Structure formats: structure tokens, C-alpha cells
Amino acid sequence: MKIRLSLLAAAAMMAATASAQGYGQQPGYPGGGMVQPQQPYGQQPYGQPGFGAGGGSFQSLSGQWYYSSPQTGNDAAPWQAQVSANGQIQASQRSPNGVSQIQGQFNGMMANTMVTTPNLRQRGKVNRSNLRLQFDGQCHVHAMFIDQRGQPMGQATFHVNHKAGEPCPN
């Protein structure tokens, strides 16, 4: 019991010290998970100053997202993505089967979203699933599809404003 309380006290002291110094954790951030002090939410929470035309804001993730997956390869039609300065995501893709959509919100490097896709077996119906996104701080958004039981069921990468195999845009 004493050891558990000591560990809790040590963790609380470390959290208080980090908070007092103005740092916060951002999972997935390649720079060790730290955000610079006084960093406004949604403005360069991810390591690469000057990323895209937005200078590092989430808005610089707007544009065409090219999809690639180890399971299905590359989609021919890019997704049209709009990402607001505070990280709200709306993306859509048109295909011969219908329109697919992604809606959600970035919180740091991560986003929880909902994806709707046409149901190929029942015309006019859609499939809905959770999609977890993680921005790599450069020009890729990695995706993990989650089934109704909360289990991973597939992964993919969205290449932001460039096709798979091409370098990141400036």
C-alpha cells in the first residue's frame, strides 16, 4: 500500500511540474510528446514548423488525401478533405458505388472520426464504422478502422496533397 501511494505521489508531482512548466503531452508527436509552452490549440501542435501553406496549422491538412492500404492497394479517386484551424475534419470521396464520408475532430495528433461508405450488398444503405487517425507531423494521416466491437479491422494511410510514393509537398 505504501509503495502504491508513493508511486501515485511521484506521478502527481511529475504531472504538476510538467504543468507548471507549461508542457503537455501529445501522443504520437515525434518530438517526444511535448508541446511548446503557450501553444494555442490547433496551431502547430506537431513538430514541423512551416508545414504546408498554413504554416503548421491543421488547415494545412486540407486538400486532396490519397488513400493507400496494404489490404486494398491505392484508391484511384482522392478524398476531398477540409480541416479547420481547430482540427475539425470533413472529407468525402466519390466513386462509382456512391459517396464515402469522414467526419471527426483532431485532438493533438490523434482524431476519432466516423466513416460512412456505400453498402455494396444493399443499394441505398451505408456502412458506418469508427476510424482512428494519427497525423505523422509531415504529410501522412495513418488510419485504423475499428469494428462495432471496438476491435481493429484494417489500416490505411492518407497521403496529404500527394500520391503514394511521391515526396511530401513543400
Image (tube, helix red, strand yellow):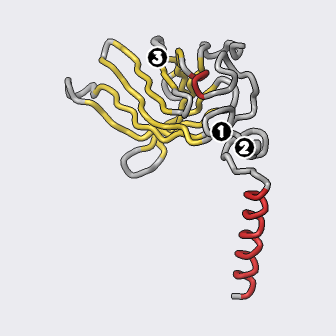
Query: In terms of depth relative to the viewer, which is nearer, 40 or 71?
Result: 40
Residue 40 is marked as 1
Q: Quadrant of residue 86?
A: top right
Residue 80 is marked as 3
Quarter of the image with the C terminus in it? top right
Q: Are marks 3 and 1 in contact (CB under 8 Å)?
A: no
Residue shown at 59% from the left, 28% from the top: 58
Residue 38 is marked as 2
Label 1 crowd (10 A; few <14 / some 14-19 / many >=20): few
Residue 167 is marked as none
Label 3 crowd (10 A; few <14 / some 14-19 / many >=20): some
Q: Quadrant of residue 116?
A: top left
Q: Which numbered disc flags the more N-terminal residue, 3 or 2?
A: 2
Q: Is residue 43 above or below residue 149?
A: above
In this view, the mark in front (3 or 1):
1
Residue 156, percent from left and from top: 54, 30
Quarter of the image with the N terminus in it? bottom right
Residue shown at 49% from the left, 37% from the top: 105
Residue 103, percent from left and from top: 42, 32
